[in-house]
Image (tube, helix red, strand yellow):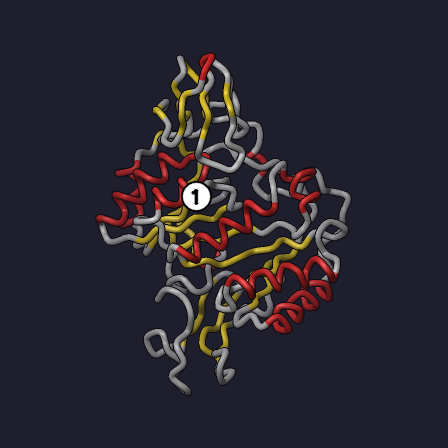
Amino acid sequence: MKKEAFLYKRLEDGLVECLLCRHRCRIKESKYGFCGVRQNEGSKLYTHAYGKVIANNLDPIEKKPLYHFFPGSTAYSVATLGCNFRCGFCQNWQISQGAKGRAEGFELMPDDIVREARAQGARSISYTYTEPTIFFEYAYDTARLAKAKGLYNNFVTNGYMSREALDKIRPYLDAANVDLKAFNEKTYADVCKGHLEAVLDSIRYMKEIGIWIEVTTLVVPGLNDSDEELKDIAGFIAEAGVEIPWHISRFHPGYKYVNLEATPLPTLKKAWQFGKDAGLRYIYLGNVGEIANTLCYNCGELLITRDYLYTSDSKLDGNKCPKCSTVLDGVF
């Protein structure tokens, strides 16, 4: 479905400038932006991602991963085609890449999503699998309706949206898991086709405006797994907020990185130690089935037990440790 886009301005000579993400594409007549779903038609910017779902599932919230956002609940998850990054290690590349001109998916309007989410007992709606920024209008309308019906909303994102986009959706967006893919500007420029500082700014700004944040780093051998880089990521997160959970995730070969080995477990555990050394309260390993439980950062009491992607037991007293009454950071 074609719909006029949010957040753009008209320029001279028929150009339009998209203000939705940090690329700030200047798009000529009939051409698409970098994401492949936003097109200039008659000096107006239109999105072709509205109401066209490529994937929808009921997921455990831990799959996002969000471990401190209603743990044990489910999220009704939706995605459309497209992305504003070009990562060669993308785990969902079949639906995130090459969106321009493709018309796959099926119609599911915002009120249909909210109705389905409530019928299936979801606590939240998750805009995920691809990049929610590129289907922002669709996500915004859905999130607004969801909030009115008592549901929460979360983004699983690369963090490359503009501050204007965050300001617009802030009343309806409760949480985000941001992929911090590296801590090297050249890696972001060459591999993702973006800029590191823009992602760092989004993380800082989300925290500033009150969106609950968790950060994921997929550790790719030879790309972002040096001690220096992992220490830098841990240090940045600690500077942004020691209460921000860091999910250190194992890479498995795929897409353009089929010739690499899976991330060695010792590398992940080394990154975990760097996080501890930086003062982070909550550090988890992903895709390995261990170091997934939540402990009280004050007394060490086991608070939440997870069995891979599911919360199997919680000893929380509301949002507090039953042993020392320390408040667990998050949304409960």
Does residue 54 appear in the picture of this structure? no
Query: Residue 300: x and y, percent?
Result: 51, 82
Query: Residue 217: x and y, percent?
Result: 60, 55
Q: Is residue 228 above or below residue 31?
A: below
Query: Residue 110: x and y, percent?
Result: 30, 37
Provide the secondary structure element on which disc 1 rests: helix
Identify the residue shown where x is 49% and y is 57%: 65
* Res 46 quadrant in image: top left
* Res 5 quadrant in image: top left
Say which amino acid is labelled 1: Arg
Does residue 266 appear in the picture of this structure? yes
Which of the image's four quarters has the C terminus? bottom left
Report the label total: 1
Assess disc 1: are there few (<14), some (14-19) or many (≥20) residues with their C-alpha within 10 Å of its C-alpha.
some
In the picture, measured across the screen, residue 181 lies left or right of residue 294, that is right
Residue at the disc numbered 1: 163
The furthest residue to the left:
148
The furthest residue to the front:
12
In the picture, measured across the screen, residue 282 lies left or right of residue 227, that is left
Identify the residue shown where x is 49% and y is 43%: 129
In the picture, measured across the screen, residue 133 lies left or right of residue 140, that is right
